[in-house]
Image (cartoon, rainbow, N blue to C red):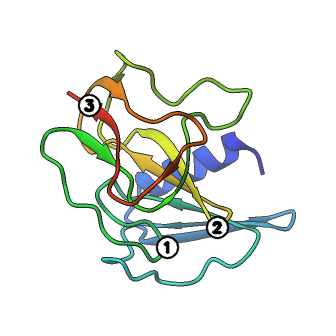
C-alpha cells in the first residue's frame, strides 16, 4: 500500500457518509474513523496498523488523548502528544510552507504516537503565517503547531 492508495481511500471516505472504513492489503491494514467521539476511541488499532484521523485539529484522533479546544484565531494545535512530521515522507516536500494558502480539511502535518501516524488538518481556509515546530520535535497535546490567518 503506497501513499497514493492511502490518499485515494481518504478522499473516498471524505466524499461519503461513512463513519468508519477499513482496508487490508499485503499484511497492512488502514482504518479510517471519522470523529469517533470525544476522547474515547472506537477500537484499539493494534500493532502494525496505520490510523488516519478524519478529524480536524481540535478533535481527538483515534487514540485516547485530551481534546484540544477549538481555536478561533487560526492556531493549529496538536490533538495529542507525539513526534511531529511536517512532510509525508523524508524524500517528499512539506505538507505546507509559510505563505501557502490552505483549505479547511487539508492535511498540514502528521503526529506520530505509539507507531501510529495521525493526520492534523486545517480547521479553516487561510494562509500559513507561521510554522512553530521543526520536523521531529516532540509536541504535547494542545501545543500550537502553526498559525493560519
Left/right placement of residue 39 relative to residue 48 reads: left
Image quadrant assignment for residue 50: bottom right
Image quadrant assignment for residue 133: top left
Judged from the image, the secondary structure of the residue bearing numbered disc 1 is loop
The answer to which of marks 1 and 3 sits earlier in the sequence is 1
**Of marks 2 and 3, the one in the foreground:** 2
Above or below, 85 against 39 in this view is above
Name the residue located 17 percent from the left edge and 49 percent from the top edge.
Answer: 71
Task: Report x, y in % for residue 88.
Answer: 62, 38
The answer to which of marks 2 and 3 sits earlier in the sequence is 2
Q: Which mark is residue 148?
A: 3
Pointer 2: what residue? 114
Judged from the image, the secondary structure of the residue bearing numbered disc 3 is strand
Pointer 1: what residue? 63
Task: Report x, y in % for residue 125.
Answer: 24, 32
Task: Report x, y in % for residue 66.
Answer: 34, 72
Q: Do tag 1 and tag 3 residues touch (Cβ < 8 Å)?
A: no
Looking at the rendered image, the quarter that the C terminus falls into is top left
Name the residue located 55 percent from the left edge and 43 percent from the top edge.
Answer: 137
Number of numbered discs overlaid on the protein picture: 3
Q: Nearer the viewer, residue 94 or 18?
A: 94
Above or below, 147 against 1 in this view is above
**In 3D space, how far apart are the residues under numbered discs 2 and 3 (Cα atoms)?**
28 Å
Name the residue located 30 percent from the left edge and 77 percent from the top edge.
Answer: 38
Task: Report x, y in % for residue 89.
Answer: 69, 36
Badge 3 density bin: few <14, some 14–19, many ≥20, Cα 10 Å: many
Q: Do tag 2 and tag 1 residues touch (Cβ < 8 Å)?
A: yes
**In 3D space, how far apart are the residues under numbered discs 2 and 1 (Cα atoms)?**
10 Å
Amino acid at each position: 500500500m503506497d501513499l497514493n492508495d492511502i490518499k485515494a481511500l481518504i478522499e473516498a471516505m471524505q466524499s461519503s457518509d461513512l463513519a468508519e472504513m477499513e482496508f487490508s492489503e499485503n499484511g497492512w491494514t488502514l482504518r479510517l474513523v471519522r470523529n469517533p467521539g470525544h476522547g474515547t476511541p472506537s477500537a484499539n488499532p493494534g500493532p502494525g496498523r496505520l490510523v488516519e484521523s478524519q478529524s480536524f485539529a481540535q478533535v481527538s484522533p483515534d487514540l485516547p488523548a485530551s481534546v484540544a479546544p477549538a481555536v478561533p484565531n487560526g492556531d493549529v494545535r496538536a490533538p495529542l502528544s507525539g513526534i511531529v512530521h511536517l512532510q509525508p515522507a523524508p524524500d517528499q516536500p512539506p505538507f505546507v510552507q509559510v505563505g501557502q494558502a490552505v483549505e479547511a480539511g487539508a492535511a498540514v502535518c502528521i503526529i506520530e504516537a505509539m507507531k501510529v501516524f495521525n493526520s492534523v488538518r486545517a480547521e479553516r481556509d487561510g494562509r500559513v503565517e507561521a510554522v512553530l515546530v521543526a520536523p521531529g520535535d516532540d509536541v504535547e497535546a494542545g501545543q500550537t503547531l502553526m498559525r493560519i490567518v
